Amino acid sequence: QVQLVESGGGLVQPGGSLRLSCAASGSISSIYAMGWYRQAPGKQRELVAGITSYGSTNYADSVKGRFTLSRDNAKNTVYLQMNSLKPEDTAVYYCNADIRTYYHDMRAYWGQGTQVTVSS
């Protein structure tokens, strides 16, 4: 059993900042890539940013220079620092991680989602 617990979403004004956190727990053997996706109303879920177990990152063009992804392997946690937020960043943000447990081969796990609303 693996859980991804997200926190840090909320309402922020344009230009503001938020920090999302996602902590993985359970019968974890190894965590590989971790990342964040988002889904706005009426749109498909899209990758926001991803990070490998070695710390290599990639970002969607729309967030480059504004968002920073990092991870703490000792805490099984990934962080998304979001600065200079825009109304178009409004979406439900989902944490994603590729995890191998003591009982199952590697597969993708998802968090429950956290709402980010950017509005004045």
Image: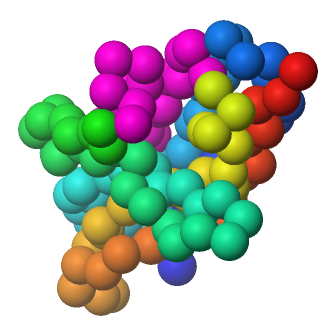
Task: Please state the horizontal and vertical placement of residue 25, each as a whole percent of the image.
Answer: 52, 58
Residue in the foreground of this view, choosing between 85 and 35 = 85
Residue in the foreground of this view, choosing between 61 and 113 = 61
Tag count in the figure? 0
Query: What residue sits 17% from the left and 45% below the top?
Result: 53
Left-right relation of 69 to 77: left
Above or below, 30 relative to 42: above
Above or below, 74 relative to 17: below
Which colour style is shown?
rainbow
- Residue reaching furthest to the bottom: 104
Query: What residue sits 83% from the left and 28% below the top?
Result: 119
Left-right relation of 47 to 10: left
Magenta highlight range: 62-85
Query: What residue sits 55% from the left and 56% below the top?
Result: 38
Query: What residue sits 76% from the left and 31% below the top?
Result: 118
Task: Please state the horizontal and vertical placement of residue 11, each as a whole percent of the image.
Answer: 85, 30
Which quadrant of the structure image shows residue 15? top right
Which quadrant of the structure image shows residue 33? bottom left
Which quadrant of the structure image shows residue 103? bottom left
Residue in the foreground of this view, choosing between 89 and 71 = 89
One can see residue 5 in this view: no
Task: Please state the horizontal and vertical placement of residue 93, each as a whole percent of the image.
Answer: 61, 52
Left-right relation of 92 to 76: right
One can see residue 40 in this view: yes
Task: Please state the horizontal and vertical placement of residue 7, each as a whole percent of the image.
Answer: 70, 40
Magenta-span inclusion, residue 56: no
Magenta-span inclusion, residue 66: yes
The quadrant of the rendering that contains the C terminus is top right
